[in-house]
Amino acid sequence: MFSHVVIFWTHPDKPNAVADLLAGGEKYLKPIPGVLSFHIGKMVGSHRPVVDQSYQIALNLVFTDKKAQDDYQVHPLHVEFVEKSFKPNCAKVVIYDFE
């Protein structure tokens, strides 16, 4: 298994950034072949101080292996997501990949 976790901080001056990014993920990323598990959603607040609450959206994808994730990265729908959803709406991103 290969997990690809992406944490997004949206532009604070764009009131529709969260909704646009969520919709873009569903439209462009979910249908890409090779994704075993797809989950995108808003940050959930917590009373626990160890929980990071500074971001707006997280994306969690699971692939069979790193090769499947590498193929996903260059898929035309992923490229379109980056151009149409990510770049216009995000101020910062952090990615965690692990096997």
Image (tube, rainbow, N blue to C red):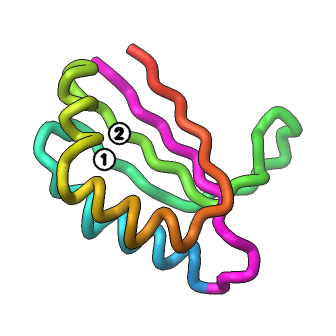
- Is residue 48 rendered to the left or right of residue 67? right
Q: Position of residue 60 (x, y in %)?
A: 42, 42
Is 9 covered by the magenta stretch?
Answer: yes
Residue 43, by quadrant, is bottom right
Q: Is residue 53 above or below residue 25?
A: above
Indicate which disc, 1 or 2, sits on the residue closer to the N terminus.
Answer: 1
Residue drawn at (31%, 47%), measured in percent from left and top? 38
Principal SS element in the magenta part? strand
Q: Where the N terminus falls, by quadrant?
A: top left
Residue drawn at (76%, 42%), measured in percent from left and top? 52
Tag 1–tag 2 contact (CB < 8 Å): yes
Is 78 covered by the magenta stretch?
Answer: no
- Is residue 40 rendered to the left or right of residue 42? left
Residue 38's disc is: 1
Residue drawn at (23%, 19%), measured in percent from left and top? 65
What is the spatial separation of the Cα atoms under label 1 and label 2, in whole angstroms? Answer: 5 Å
Q: Which residues are magenta?
A: 1-15
Q: Is residue 70 above or below residue 94?
A: above
Label 2 packing within 10 angstroms: few (<14), some (14-19), many (20+): some
Q: Where the C terminus falls, by quadrant?
A: top left
- Is residue 45 rendered to the left or right of residue 41? right
Residue on which the image places disc 2: 61
Q: In terms of secondary structure, where does tag 1 sit?
A: strand
Residue 77, by quadrant, is bottom left
